[in-house]
Amino acid sequence: MRFHREPIPVHEAQEKILAYACGGAATETVSLLESEGRRLAEDIIATSPVPHFNKSPYDGFAVRSADTIGAAIQRPAFLQVVGTIACGDAPNLQVEAGQAARIMTGAALPEGADCVIMFEMTTENEAKAEKTVGVKKEMKPWENVILLGEETKEGERVIPAGKRIGPGEMAILATFGYARVPVYRQPRVGILSTGSELLAPEEPLRYGKIRNSNSYMLASQVRQAGGQPVIYASLEDDPDLAVERIQSILSEVDVLLTTGGVSVGDFDIMVDVFNRLEVDLLFNKILMRPGSVTSAARYNNRMIFGLSGNPGACFVGFELFARPFLQALQGKTSVGLPEMEAAMGVDMKKPSSFARYVRGVWKAENGKLTAYPVGLDKSAVVTNITDANCLIRVPAGGRGIAMGDAVTVLRLPYGADE
Ligand code: AMP
Ligand code: MG
């Protein structure tokens, strides 16, 4: 199988992967505060109407509109004040004809009243509690009343399953009394970098060696895609060791990401590992750059992504394949990076037989979206990933693209410091 590689288009590879994510992952119930950032495993239903009582939007007086007929600034209608209703009170008074009740913002409207007149439109003098109040405006029935169920009806679906819980969702969950929240479990994602050249970040540099940056880059990508990263110590280029380690890691995680060793070099062990484990190979070559050797396989009901060792290619491989898979496992309905059209900001007249995913930045310039590649677009370059807020998709063939040409931009959730 070593040199047997049948390249497939990106979208086909994505479809093959997503076929294994349907049904989503397991679910669990967590406290409301813990649910922030997670994805809902069930539709959230309004457990009561909002508001669940008629209430006042102002500080003022609850009155009967019929008592205000003909009232005007010069000709106030005087009413007898029979009580005060504060926020949180369950009013135990009745507003009869010729009467008014002082009422505060958010307080429940008392029986008998059908409108609220703001203090500003009355003769009310804040200094003393008057026994009567003059209403200086004719009121319509139900004017200035927030009606029961006006915002939400009981039983309405207020958040669909699969939605990520952010500030708006937290507010809704609290409103409807969801102290415990059903969410998708976060997939545990093992990260294993391979390469005898790799040093841990705490190790001093040695000639010929480099520090393992991919594992930490991937840990961030996994976390931002809702997974729980588990970094394993990096592996030497030894297929015997690799087979053993990968088997043991797969018993501890839901998904495994490996980096390095998927090319055709003398020490590229992953091909050997896949053969020995007799995995169910989904693909081992994609019509794209960088990362054409990105592979995926199933083993023991687990997905293994064999990402390239080149940091740029590893980054792109995660975004195009692992991200949508992890999102789908957590019930997200539209997966992958959001796409939009932009104009290319520079010439890139380098023809390529494979579609290219160029790390870039998009910005709005004179009301138009423009995309620029970031620095050196070499797949081995680590230090410009920090600048990228998108991948620019440059189609295969032709003469590359010219400045001003339309391109598709895949928006990354990183890069811009917001
Ligand atoms: P490979 O895919 O194993 O052939 O690796 C391709 C290139 O990426 C080599 O120059 C490696 O040294 C580099 N590389 C591989 N793994 C890592 C890693 N975990 N962190 C940083 N660079 C890496
Ligand atoms: Mg290697």
Image: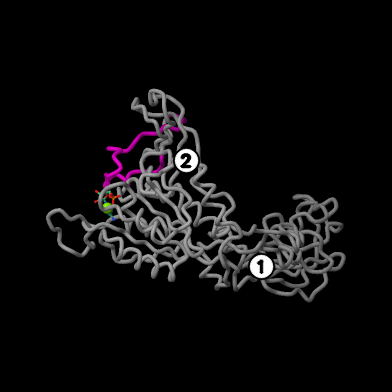
**Span shown in magenta:** 366-391
Name which quarter of the figure residue 53 lies in.
Answer: bottom right
Mark seen at residue 357: none
Q: Which residue is mark 2?
A: 8
- Give 217 or 15, whichever is nearer the viewer: 15
Q: Is residue 92 magenta?
A: no
In the rendered structure, which disc, 2 or 1, sits on the residue that comes first in sequence?
2
- Give 312 or 15, whichever is nearer the viewer: 15
Mark seen at residue 176: 1
x, y percent for residue 271: 36, 53
Give the total number of marks visible in the rendering: 2
x, y percent for residue 413: 43, 49
> Which amino acid does the dot numbered 2 rest on?
Ile
x, y percent for residue 265: 27, 48
> Which amino acid does the dot numbered 1 rest on?
Phe
- Callout 1: CB less than 8 Å from ligand 1: no
**Separation of disc 2 and disc 1 at Cα?**
48 Å
x, y percent for residue 31: 55, 73
Which residue occupies 50% across, 37% down?
A: 340
- Give 123 or 91, whichever is nearer the viewer: 91
Left or right: 89 in relation to 349:
right
Colour basis: one colour
Which of discs 2 and 1 lies nearer the camera? The answer is 2
Asked whether the residues under the numbered discs 2 and 1 touch, taking CB atoms below 8 Å apart as contact, a structural biologist would say no
Which residue occupies 55% across, 72% down?
A: 30
Which residue occupies 26% across, 53% down?
A: 267
- Callout 2: helix, strand or loop? loop
